[in-house]
Amino acid sequence: MSVPRNRTDQHDKPASFSIENDTIFPVPEERRHGNAWSLLLVWIGANQNIMAIMTGLIYPALYHLSLGWSLLAILAGNLLGGVFMALHAAQGPHLGIPQMQQTRGQFGATGSLLIIAIIILMYISFTTTFFAMGREQAALVFGTAPSQVSIWISAVLIGILCTIGHGIIERVISGFIPVAAVTFLLLATAYLFASHGHLARPVWQIPTLHDFLAAFSLGVLWQIAYAPYVSDYTRYLPSRTGERTAFFVCLAGSVIGTALPTFIGSYLGSTTFAGTMYDAVRPYSAILPILLFLVMATSTLVSSTMQVYCAALSSLTFLQTFRADWKPTGLARAMAAVLILLTSALITINLTGNTLDILNNVIALLLAVLSPWTAINLVDYYLIRHGQYDIASLFQRDGGIYGEVNRPALACYMLGILVQIPFLSNGLYVGPIASLYGGIDFSWVIGILVPGAVYWFWARRPH
Protein backbone atom coordinates (compact mmCIF):
# COMPACT_ATOMS: atom_id res chain seq x y z
CA MET A 1 0.00 0.00 0.00
CA SER A 2 1.35 3.43 -0.89
CA VAL A 3 1.03 6.19 1.66
CA PRO A 4 -1.35 8.91 0.42
CA ARG A 5 0.03 12.39 -0.09
CA ASN A 6 -1.75 15.61 -0.72
CA ARG A 7 -1.23 17.38 -4.03
CA THR A 8 1.75 19.69 -3.74
CA ASP A 9 4.41 20.94 -6.08
CA GLN A 10 7.19 18.42 -5.68
CA HIS A 11 9.88 21.09 -5.93
CA ASP A 12 8.43 24.07 -4.12
CA LYS A 13 9.13 24.42 -0.45
CA PRO A 14 6.25 25.90 1.53
CA ALA A 15 6.32 29.66 1.84
CA SER A 16 5.19 31.28 5.08
CA PHE A 17 1.89 32.49 3.64
CA SER A 18 1.04 29.47 1.46
CA ILE A 19 -1.60 27.07 2.73
CA GLU A 20 -0.07 23.96 4.25
CA ASN A 21 -1.61 20.81 2.80
CA ASP A 22 0.52 17.97 4.16
CA THR A 23 -1.60 17.50 7.34
CA ILE A 24 -1.11 14.04 8.87
CA PHE A 25 0.68 12.32 6.00
CA PRO A 26 4.47 11.94 5.69
CA VAL A 27 6.10 15.18 4.60
CA PRO A 28 8.03 14.50 1.37
CA GLU A 29 11.73 15.25 1.52
CA GLU A 30 11.39 17.94 -1.14
CA ARG A 31 8.87 19.73 1.09
CA ARG A 32 11.17 19.69 4.11
CA HIS A 33 12.80 22.93 5.24
CA GLY A 34 14.47 24.52 8.22
CA ASN A 35 17.56 23.68 10.22
CA ALA A 36 18.86 23.46 13.77
CA TRP A 37 18.71 27.24 14.18
CA SER A 38 15.06 27.50 13.14
CA LEU A 39 14.16 24.64 15.49
CA LEU A 40 16.01 26.36 18.35
CA LEU A 41 14.03 29.55 17.77
CA VAL A 42 10.69 27.70 17.66
CA TRP A 43 11.22 26.15 21.08
CA ILE A 44 12.60 29.30 22.64
CA GLY A 45 9.61 31.22 21.31
CA ALA A 46 7.10 28.55 22.28
CA ASN A 47 7.77 29.24 25.95
CA GLN A 48 7.69 33.06 25.90
CA ASN A 49 4.26 33.41 27.42
CA ILE A 50 2.44 34.70 30.44
CA MET A 51 1.79 31.17 31.71
CA ALA A 52 5.55 30.73 32.18
CA ILE A 53 5.69 33.98 34.17
CA MET A 54 2.69 32.94 36.27
CA THR A 55 4.34 29.57 36.85
CA GLY A 56 7.46 31.39 38.04
CA LEU A 57 5.36 33.18 40.66
CA ILE A 58 4.57 29.78 42.19
CA TYR A 59 8.17 29.11 43.25
CA PRO A 60 8.36 31.85 45.93
CA ALA A 61 4.61 31.97 46.70
CA LEU A 62 3.72 28.29 47.16
CA TYR A 63 7.10 26.58 47.56
CA HIS A 64 8.72 29.41 49.58
CA LEU A 65 11.92 29.29 47.54
CA SER A 66 14.38 32.16 47.53
CA LEU A 67 15.43 33.59 44.19
CA GLY A 68 18.65 31.58 43.94
CA TRP A 69 17.02 28.28 44.79
CA SER A 70 14.14 29.07 42.43
CA LEU A 71 16.66 29.34 39.60
CA LEU A 72 18.20 25.98 40.52
CA ALA A 73 14.79 24.28 40.70
CA ILE A 74 13.72 25.82 37.38
CA LEU A 75 16.85 24.73 35.54
CA ALA A 76 17.08 21.25 37.07
CA GLY A 77 13.39 20.39 36.63
CA ASN A 78 13.16 21.67 33.09
CA LEU A 79 16.39 19.97 32.11
CA LEU A 80 15.22 16.55 33.28
CA GLY A 81 11.73 16.93 31.85
CA GLY A 82 13.22 18.37 28.67
CA VAL A 83 15.15 15.17 28.04
CA PHE A 84 11.91 13.19 27.72
CA MET A 85 10.33 15.91 25.59
CA ALA A 86 13.33 16.24 23.25
CA LEU A 87 13.49 12.47 22.72
CA HIS A 88 10.06 12.77 21.11
CA ALA A 89 11.21 15.72 19.01
CA ALA A 90 13.97 13.62 17.48
CA GLN A 91 11.34 11.36 15.91
CA GLY A 92 10.00 14.11 13.63
CA PRO A 93 12.83 14.47 11.07
CA HIS A 94 13.20 10.71 10.83
CA LEU A 95 9.54 9.75 10.29
CA GLY A 96 8.07 12.99 8.94
CA ILE A 97 4.65 12.42 10.51
CA PRO A 98 2.73 13.90 13.46
CA GLN A 99 3.34 12.34 16.86
CA MET A 100 -0.16 10.91 17.29
CA GLN A 101 0.03 9.15 13.93
CA GLN A 102 3.21 7.43 15.08
CA THR A 103 1.48 6.35 18.30
CA ARG A 104 -0.43 3.77 16.23
CA GLY A 105 2.85 1.88 16.05
CA GLN A 106 2.67 1.15 19.78
CA PHE A 107 -1.05 0.80 20.46
CA GLY A 108 -2.54 -0.24 17.12
CA ALA A 109 -4.94 1.64 14.87
CA THR A 110 -7.95 1.49 17.18
CA GLY A 111 -6.01 1.09 20.41
CA SER A 112 -4.38 4.49 19.90
CA LEU A 113 -7.75 6.27 19.90
CA LEU A 114 -7.83 6.44 23.72
CA ILE A 115 -4.44 8.15 23.78
CA ILE A 116 -5.36 10.54 20.97
CA ALA A 117 -8.64 11.51 22.69
CA ILE A 118 -6.79 12.29 25.94
CA ILE A 119 -4.23 14.38 24.08
CA ILE A 120 -6.97 16.37 22.30
CA LEU A 121 -8.63 16.99 25.66
CA MET A 122 -5.30 18.24 27.01
CA TYR A 123 -4.90 20.66 24.10
CA ILE A 124 -8.40 22.04 24.64
CA SER A 125 -7.72 22.43 28.37
CA PHE A 126 -4.50 24.37 27.76
CA THR A 127 -6.16 26.58 25.14
CA THR A 128 -9.02 27.29 27.52
CA THR A 129 -6.53 28.23 30.24
CA PHE A 130 -4.73 30.66 27.92
CA PHE A 131 -8.06 32.21 26.88
CA ALA A 132 -9.03 32.66 30.53
CA MET A 133 -5.65 34.23 31.34
CA GLY A 134 -6.05 36.69 28.49
CA ARG A 135 -9.50 37.67 29.72
CA GLU A 136 -8.26 38.18 33.27
CA GLN A 137 -5.31 40.28 32.11
CA ALA A 138 -7.66 42.53 30.11
CA ALA A 139 -9.78 43.07 33.22
CA LEU A 140 -6.67 43.95 35.26
CA VAL A 141 -5.26 46.52 32.87
CA PHE A 142 -8.53 48.19 31.85
CA GLY A 143 -10.17 47.97 35.26
CA THR A 144 -13.40 46.53 33.94
CA ALA A 145 -15.36 43.36 34.47
CA PRO A 146 -13.98 40.38 32.51
CA SER A 147 -15.05 40.64 28.87
CA GLN A 148 -15.36 37.88 26.27
CA VAL A 149 -14.17 40.17 23.46
CA SER A 150 -10.51 39.19 23.89
CA ILE A 151 -11.47 35.52 23.58
CA TRP A 152 -13.22 35.96 20.24
CA ILE A 153 -10.47 38.19 18.84
CA SER A 154 -7.90 35.56 19.80
CA ALA A 155 -10.03 32.78 18.31
CA VAL A 156 -10.27 34.58 14.95
CA LEU A 157 -6.53 35.25 14.77
CA ILE A 158 -5.63 31.71 15.83
CA GLY A 159 -8.06 30.31 13.26
CA ILE A 160 -6.32 32.29 10.50
CA LEU A 161 -2.86 31.11 11.56
CA CYS A 162 -3.95 27.47 11.82
CA THR A 163 -5.61 27.68 8.41
CA ILE A 164 -2.37 28.85 6.78
CA GLY A 165 -0.43 26.25 8.73
CA HIS A 166 3.05 25.36 9.86
CA GLY A 167 5.07 27.93 7.91
CA ILE A 168 3.38 31.05 9.26
CA ILE A 169 3.10 29.60 12.78
CA GLU A 170 6.84 28.99 12.84
CA ARG A 171 7.53 32.55 11.68
CA VAL A 172 5.20 34.09 14.26
CA ILE A 173 6.72 32.05 17.10
CA SER A 174 10.28 33.00 16.13
CA GLY A 175 9.43 36.64 15.48
CA PHE A 176 7.84 37.03 18.90
CA ILE A 177 11.07 36.13 20.75
CA PRO A 178 12.76 39.56 20.79
CA VAL A 179 9.48 41.31 21.64
CA ALA A 180 8.83 38.98 24.57
CA ALA A 181 12.43 38.93 25.82
CA VAL A 182 12.76 42.73 25.88
CA THR A 183 9.34 43.16 27.49
CA PHE A 184 10.02 40.59 30.22
CA LEU A 185 13.41 42.13 31.04
CA LEU A 186 11.92 45.63 31.20
CA LEU A 187 9.15 44.30 33.43
CA ALA A 188 11.75 42.85 35.79
CA THR A 189 13.52 46.23 35.80
CA ALA A 190 10.25 47.96 36.72
CA TYR A 191 9.88 45.58 39.68
CA LEU A 192 13.47 46.29 40.68
CA PHE A 193 12.73 49.99 41.01
CA ALA A 194 9.25 49.50 42.46
CA SER A 195 10.66 47.35 45.28
CA HIS A 196 13.84 49.47 45.62
CA GLY A 197 15.83 46.29 45.05
CA HIS A 198 14.45 44.57 48.13
CA LEU A 199 13.68 40.83 48.17
CA ALA A 200 11.23 39.17 50.53
CA ARG A 201 13.90 36.63 51.56
CA PRO A 202 17.69 36.30 51.10
CA VAL A 203 18.78 35.11 47.64
CA TRP A 204 20.27 31.84 48.90
CA GLN A 205 18.02 31.14 51.86
CA ILE A 206 18.05 27.34 52.05
CA PRO A 207 14.59 25.81 51.50
CA THR A 208 13.25 22.60 52.95
CA LEU A 209 13.88 19.47 50.88
CA HIS A 210 10.12 19.10 50.51
CA ASP A 211 9.70 22.56 48.96
CA PHE A 212 12.64 22.15 46.58
CA LEU A 213 11.50 18.75 45.33
CA ALA A 214 7.96 20.02 44.80
CA ALA A 215 9.31 22.95 42.79
CA PHE A 216 11.62 20.62 40.87
CA SER A 217 8.65 18.47 39.82
CA LEU A 218 6.88 21.55 38.49
CA GLY A 219 9.62 22.07 35.90
CA VAL A 220 9.62 18.40 34.91
CA LEU A 221 5.87 18.41 34.30
CA TRP A 222 6.09 21.63 32.26
CA GLN A 223 8.39 19.94 29.77
CA ILE A 224 6.62 16.57 29.68
CA ALA A 225 3.45 18.41 28.68
CA TYR A 226 5.17 19.22 25.37
CA ALA A 227 5.92 15.57 24.59
CA PRO A 228 2.81 14.84 22.48
CA TYR A 229 3.44 17.55 19.94
CA VAL A 230 7.12 18.30 19.50
CA SER A 231 7.25 15.98 16.48
CA ASP A 232 4.40 17.95 14.92
CA TYR A 233 6.85 20.85 14.61
CA THR A 234 10.00 18.87 13.76
CA ARG A 235 8.47 16.73 11.02
CA TYR A 236 9.23 19.43 8.43
CA LEU A 237 12.97 19.33 9.13
CA PRO A 238 15.06 17.56 6.45
CA SER A 239 15.82 13.98 7.43
CA ARG A 240 19.54 14.81 7.25
CA THR A 241 18.99 16.96 10.35
CA GLY A 242 19.34 13.74 12.31
CA GLU A 243 17.88 12.57 15.60
CA ARG A 244 20.86 13.69 17.67
CA THR A 245 20.76 17.26 16.38
CA ALA A 246 16.98 17.49 16.77
CA PHE A 247 17.26 16.19 20.33
CA PHE A 248 19.94 18.60 21.58
CA VAL A 249 18.57 21.65 19.78
CA CYS A 250 15.02 21.04 20.98
CA LEU A 251 16.26 20.40 24.53
CA ALA A 252 18.35 23.58 24.58
CA GLY A 253 15.60 25.71 23.04
CA SER A 254 12.88 24.55 25.38
CA VAL A 255 14.98 24.75 28.56
CA ILE A 256 16.38 28.20 27.70
CA GLY A 257 13.01 29.44 26.48
CA THR A 258 11.26 28.27 29.64
CA ALA A 259 13.95 29.33 32.11
CA LEU A 260 13.95 33.03 31.13
CA PRO A 261 10.26 33.91 31.67
CA THR A 262 9.86 31.47 34.56
CA PHE A 263 12.86 32.89 36.38
CA ILE A 264 11.60 36.43 35.74
CA GLY A 265 8.26 35.35 37.19
CA SER A 266 10.00 34.00 40.27
CA TYR A 267 11.86 37.31 40.59
CA LEU A 268 8.61 39.27 40.40
CA GLY A 269 7.19 37.07 43.14
CA SER A 270 10.34 37.38 45.26
CA THR A 271 10.34 41.19 45.47
CA THR A 272 8.56 43.18 48.15
CA PHE A 273 6.38 44.95 45.58
CA ALA A 274 2.76 43.98 46.23
CA GLY A 275 1.03 45.39 43.13
CA THR A 276 0.29 43.80 39.77
CA MET A 277 2.69 43.87 36.85
CA TYR A 278 0.60 46.67 35.36
CA ASP A 279 0.94 48.68 38.57
CA ALA A 280 4.72 48.33 38.29
CA VAL A 281 4.90 50.04 34.89
CA ARG A 282 2.02 52.52 35.24
CA PRO A 283 4.08 55.27 37.03
CA TYR A 284 6.29 55.71 33.96
CA SER A 285 3.52 56.22 31.39
CA ALA A 286 -0.20 55.61 31.11
CA ILE A 287 0.38 53.81 27.82
CA LEU A 288 2.81 51.23 29.24
CA PRO A 289 0.17 49.00 30.91
CA ILE A 290 -1.65 48.80 27.58
CA LEU A 291 1.54 47.92 25.69
CA LEU A 292 2.42 45.33 28.32
CA PHE A 293 -1.05 43.83 28.02
CA LEU A 294 -0.71 43.62 24.23
CA VAL A 295 2.53 41.65 24.59
CA MET A 296 1.01 39.34 27.21
CA ALA A 297 -2.11 38.85 25.08
CA THR A 298 0.05 38.08 22.06
CA SER A 299 1.94 35.48 24.10
CA THR A 300 -1.32 33.69 24.88
CA LEU A 301 -2.25 33.85 21.20
CA VAL A 302 1.09 32.33 20.11
CA SER A 303 0.88 29.51 22.65
CA SER A 304 -2.79 28.82 21.93
CA THR A 305 -2.03 28.60 18.22
CA MET A 306 0.48 25.83 18.91
CA GLN A 307 -2.11 23.96 20.96
CA VAL A 308 -4.91 24.31 18.40
CA TYR A 309 -2.72 23.40 15.42
CA CYS A 310 -1.60 20.17 17.08
CA ALA A 311 -5.13 19.44 18.32
CA ALA A 312 -6.37 19.77 14.73
CA LEU A 313 -3.74 17.30 13.48
CA SER A 314 -4.62 14.88 16.30
CA SER A 315 -8.32 15.22 15.44
CA LEU A 316 -7.63 14.36 11.80
CA THR A 317 -5.63 11.34 12.94
CA PHE A 318 -8.56 10.28 15.13
CA LEU A 319 -11.08 10.57 12.27
CA GLN A 320 -8.83 9.02 9.64
CA THR A 321 -8.73 5.87 11.76
CA PHE A 322 -12.29 5.16 10.64
CA ARG A 323 -11.76 6.21 7.01
CA ALA A 324 -8.42 4.91 5.84
CA ASP A 325 -9.10 6.14 2.29
CA TRP A 326 -9.76 9.71 3.47
CA LYS A 327 -7.06 12.22 2.58
CA PRO A 328 -7.59 15.28 4.81
CA THR A 329 -6.25 18.52 3.33
CA GLY A 330 -5.59 21.98 4.67
CA LEU A 331 -9.32 22.70 4.57
CA ALA A 332 -10.01 19.77 6.88
CA ARG A 333 -7.32 20.99 9.27
CA ALA A 334 -8.86 24.48 9.23
CA MET A 335 -12.33 23.11 9.98
CA ALA A 336 -10.96 21.00 12.83
CA ALA A 337 -9.15 24.04 14.24
CA VAL A 338 -12.33 26.13 14.12
CA LEU A 339 -14.32 23.48 16.00
CA ILE A 340 -11.60 23.21 18.64
CA LEU A 341 -11.47 26.99 18.99
CA LEU A 342 -15.25 27.22 19.39
CA THR A 343 -15.18 24.48 22.02
CA SER A 344 -12.35 26.17 23.95
CA ALA A 345 -14.00 29.60 23.71
CA LEU A 346 -17.37 28.34 24.94
CA ILE A 347 -15.76 26.53 27.86
CA THR A 348 -13.83 29.66 28.81
CA ILE A 349 -16.91 31.88 28.61
CA ASN A 350 -18.63 29.62 31.13
CA LEU A 351 -15.70 29.59 33.56
CA THR A 352 -16.48 31.56 36.70
CA GLY A 353 -14.96 31.98 40.14
CA ASN A 354 -12.62 29.16 41.05
CA THR A 355 -13.47 27.13 37.97
CA LEU A 356 -10.09 28.05 36.47
CA ASP A 357 -8.37 26.46 39.46
CA ILE A 358 -10.41 23.32 38.87
CA LEU A 359 -9.37 23.36 35.22
CA ASN A 360 -5.70 23.59 36.21
CA ASN A 361 -6.17 20.56 38.43
CA VAL A 362 -7.79 18.69 35.55
CA ILE A 363 -4.73 19.49 33.45
CA ALA A 364 -2.55 18.08 36.23
CA LEU A 365 -4.50 14.82 36.04
CA LEU A 366 -4.18 14.81 32.26
CA LEU A 367 -0.43 15.09 32.63
CA ALA A 368 -0.54 12.08 34.93
CA VAL A 369 -2.12 9.99 32.19
CA LEU A 370 0.45 11.38 29.76
CA SER A 371 3.52 9.97 31.53
CA PRO A 372 2.82 6.28 30.72
CA TRP A 373 2.32 7.14 27.05
CA THR A 374 5.67 8.96 27.03
CA ALA A 375 7.42 5.94 28.52
CA ILE A 376 5.87 3.39 26.15
CA ASN A 377 6.45 5.55 23.08
CA LEU A 378 10.11 6.20 23.87
CA VAL A 379 10.89 2.61 24.83
CA ASP A 380 9.25 1.34 21.65
CA TYR A 381 10.99 3.87 19.40
CA TYR A 382 14.51 3.77 20.84
CA LEU A 383 14.90 0.38 22.52
CA ILE A 384 12.58 -1.96 20.62
CA ARG A 385 12.22 -0.78 17.01
CA HIS A 386 15.21 1.59 16.89
CA GLY A 387 13.21 4.07 14.85
CA GLN A 388 12.21 1.57 12.16
CA TYR A 389 8.47 1.75 11.43
CA ASP A 390 6.37 0.64 8.51
CA ILE A 391 4.85 4.02 7.66
CA ALA A 392 2.23 2.56 5.31
CA SER A 393 0.82 0.39 8.13
CA LEU A 394 0.26 3.46 10.27
CA PHE A 395 -2.36 4.64 7.77
CA GLN A 396 -4.24 1.36 7.28
CA ARG A 397 -7.64 0.79 8.88
CA ASP A 398 -6.54 -2.54 10.37
CA GLY A 399 -3.21 -1.13 11.51
CA GLY A 400 -1.18 -3.24 9.09
CA ILE A 401 1.63 -5.02 10.90
CA TYR A 402 0.71 -3.20 14.14
CA GLY A 403 -2.87 -4.51 14.22
CA GLU A 404 -6.02 -2.80 15.39
CA VAL A 405 -5.36 -3.09 19.12
CA ASN A 406 -2.11 -3.88 20.89
CA ARG A 407 -3.61 -5.16 24.15
CA PRO A 408 -0.32 -5.62 26.05
CA ALA A 409 0.67 -2.02 25.27
CA LEU A 410 -2.71 -0.75 26.47
CA ALA A 411 -2.39 -2.93 29.58
CA CYS A 412 1.00 -1.35 30.30
CA TYR A 413 -0.55 2.06 29.79
CA MET A 414 -3.41 1.40 32.20
CA LEU A 415 -0.93 -0.05 34.71
CA GLY A 416 1.07 3.15 34.41
CA ILE A 417 -2.01 5.18 35.36
CA LEU A 418 -3.02 2.95 38.28
CA VAL A 419 0.41 2.86 39.94
CA GLN A 420 0.49 6.66 39.99
CA ILE A 421 -2.68 7.06 42.05
CA PRO A 422 -1.01 6.77 45.49
CA PHE A 423 1.60 9.33 44.41
CA LEU A 424 -0.73 11.95 42.93
CA SER A 425 -1.02 15.35 44.60
CA ASN A 426 -3.17 18.18 43.28
CA GLY A 427 -6.25 20.16 44.22
CA LEU A 428 -8.57 17.33 43.25
CA TYR A 429 -6.82 14.40 44.91
CA VAL A 430 -3.85 13.68 47.16
CA GLY A 431 -2.73 10.05 47.29
CA PRO A 432 -1.71 8.32 50.53
CA ILE A 433 2.00 8.10 49.67
CA ALA A 434 2.05 11.73 48.51
CA SER A 435 0.45 12.67 51.86
CA LEU A 436 3.23 10.91 53.75
CA TYR A 437 5.79 13.12 51.98
CA GLY A 438 4.02 16.41 52.48
CA GLY A 439 2.02 16.44 49.26
CA ILE A 440 4.93 16.25 46.79
CA ASP A 441 3.68 14.95 43.44
CA PHE A 442 6.15 12.35 42.21
CA SER A 443 3.56 10.42 40.24
CA TRP A 444 5.39 11.23 37.01
CA VAL A 445 8.42 9.20 38.17
CA ILE A 446 6.31 6.10 38.75
CA GLY A 447 4.26 6.79 35.64
CA ILE A 448 7.38 6.69 33.49
CA LEU A 449 9.48 3.97 35.12
CA VAL A 450 6.87 1.27 35.74
CA PRO A 451 5.05 1.13 32.36
CA GLY A 452 8.33 1.72 30.50
CA ALA A 453 10.03 -1.22 32.22
CA VAL A 454 7.04 -3.56 31.90
CA TYR A 455 6.59 -2.70 28.21
CA TRP A 456 10.30 -3.24 27.55
CA PHE A 457 10.25 -6.71 29.16
CA TRP A 458 7.08 -7.66 27.30
CA ALA A 459 8.26 -6.43 23.90
CA ARG A 460 11.61 -8.24 24.17
CA ARG A 461 10.19 -11.65 25.05
CA PRO A 462 9.79 -14.24 22.26
CA HIS A 463 6.37 -14.01 20.59
Image (cartoon, grey):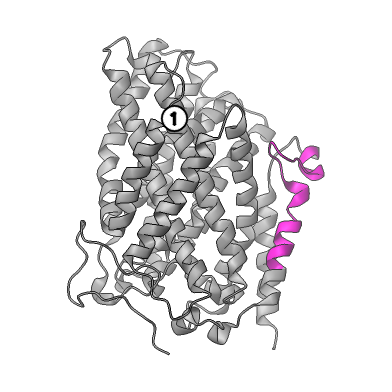
Image x and y of residue 146, in percent: 46, 24
Q: Where is residue 136 shown, x and y percent of the image? A: 46, 27
Span of residues in magenta = 412-435
Q: Residue at x 31, y 35 (%)?
A: 180
Q: Position of residue 141 (x, y in %)?
A: 38, 19
- Quadrant of the rendered image containing residue 281: top left
419 is within the stretch colored magenta: yes
Residue 135 in view of the camera: yes
Query: Tag 1's secondary structure?
Result: helix
Q: Is residue 108 left or right of residue 186?
A: right
Q: Is residue 153 left or right of residue 315?
A: left
Residue 50 position, x and y percent, is 42, 34
Determine which residue is flagged by label 1: 135
Q: How many marks?
A: 1
Q: Nearer the viewer, residue 179 or 165?
A: 165
Q: Give the residue drawn at x 57%, y 76%.
A: 109
Residue at horizontal 29 percent and vertical 70 percent from the top: 238
* Depicted 200 relative to depicted 236: above or below: above
The quarter of the displayed image where residue 191 is located? top left
Q: Quadrant of the C terminus?
A: bottom right
